[in-house]
Image (cartoon, helix red, strand yellow):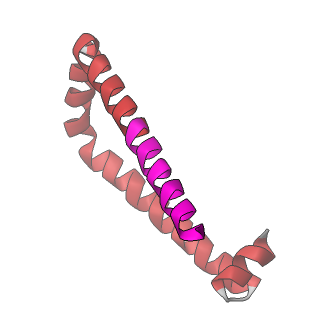
Amino acid sequence: MLAAASGLAGISPRRFLLVDGTALILWGTVYTSLGWIFAADVEPVIAWVTGNLRLVGPLLLVGLVGAALLRWWKAGMHDHAAAADRR
């Protein structure tokens, strides 16, 4: 898998590991730091959401169903366009 990933990136496996490892450390540090910085701001939101699940639950469900329907519709449009191109 390493050879395939480095080949797709167009660099040697050793350089790929160096770049990938550096990116891993950078992203881990950034996300951990942001979580630590904004923890005080996020905790009240989490408390409100968990306290109002009867309101938030249906909204999340509508959002998820809407996203799934949009994705299904887009896939159907793509299939329809591809079938028209083959004619």
The residue lying toward the viewer, choosing from 2 and 28, is 2
Q: Inspect the magenta stretch and tell me whether residue 25 lies in it.
A: no
The quadrant where residue 67 appears? top left
The residue lying toward the viewer, choosing from 47 and 2, is 2
The quadrant where residue 19 appears? bottom right
Q: How many marks?
A: 0
The spot of residue 20 in percent (x, y) is: 61, 73
* Magenta residues, dominant SS class: helix
The residue lying toward the viewer, choosing from 75 and 62, is 75
Q: Is residue 25 above or below residue 36?
A: below
In this view, which residue lies farthest toward the top?
Answer: 54
For image coordinates 79% across by 68% down, the residue present is: 1
In this view, which residue lies farthest toward the front?
Answer: 87
The residue lying toward the viewer, choosing from 63 and 38, is 63
For image coordinates 60% across by 68% down, the residue present is: 86
The spot of residue 22 in percent (x, y) is: 55, 73
Q: Is residue 85 above or below residue 65?
A: below
What is the magenta range? 69-87
Q: Is residue 16 above or below residue 2?
A: below
Quarter of the image with the C terminus in it: bottom right
The spot of residue 44 in percent (x, y) is: 20, 28
The spot of residue 60 in percent (x, y) is: 32, 26
Question: In the image, is 43 to the left or to the right of 24?
Answer: left
Q: Inspect the magenta stretch and tell me whether residue 80 lies in it.
A: yes
